[in-house]
Amino acid sequence: MEKKQLINYVNIHFKGNLNNGNTSYSQINKAKAVWWFNIHVSRFDEDVHLLLNTTDHSIWITLPKGFVSNLSDTFKIREDKNAVDLEIWADKDERYLLDVKSGGKGLNFSPFVKEIINH
């Protein structure tokens, strides 16, 4: 599913409050098995929604406002963009759904999964 379709699906079927402003979408990177995001730090002033897409399902993750006390203690921040730089591991091994970005702290996104949506 594309981002717009997935946002609509979540909002209708799961009573989500997703929109382009609070939701980031990624497909698995072709170079390595990660979902890659750059999310401006100001967006973390509210809940942040991530949509991780695969060929047969999507994962909806919600990072609630204030889920960490300090973004730079938890994530790699790209200073040139003032953005949280994420690479979430997509292979279903022991690192599945971990932030594997160099300089990151390996946050496990599993506890923040709201829904798995089969296509």
Image (spheres, rainbow, N blue to C red):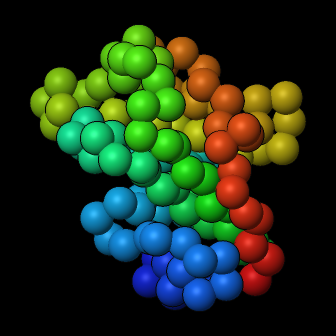
Extreme residue toward the right, this view: 93
Measuring 42% from the left and 49% from the top, which residue is drawn there?
Answer: 47
Residue 17, placed above or below residue 80: below
Position in image of residue 112 (x %, y %): 65, 43
| The C terminus - image quarter | bottom right
Measuring 28% from the left and 46% from the top, which residue is drawn there?
Answer: 43
Position in image of residue 22 (x %, y %): 35, 60
Observer able to see residue 54? no
Position in image of residue 68 (x %, y %): 47, 24
Observer able to see residue 91? yes
Left or right of 84 on screen, residue 83: left
Q: Nearer the viewer, residue 113 or 38?
A: 113
Quarter assignment of residue 20: bottom left
Left or right of 64 on screen, residue 97: right
Quarter assignment of residue 59: bottom right
Residue 67, placed above or below residue 14: above
Measuring 16% from the left and 37% from the top, which residue is drawn there?
Answer: 81
Position in image of residue 76 (x %, y %): 38, 22
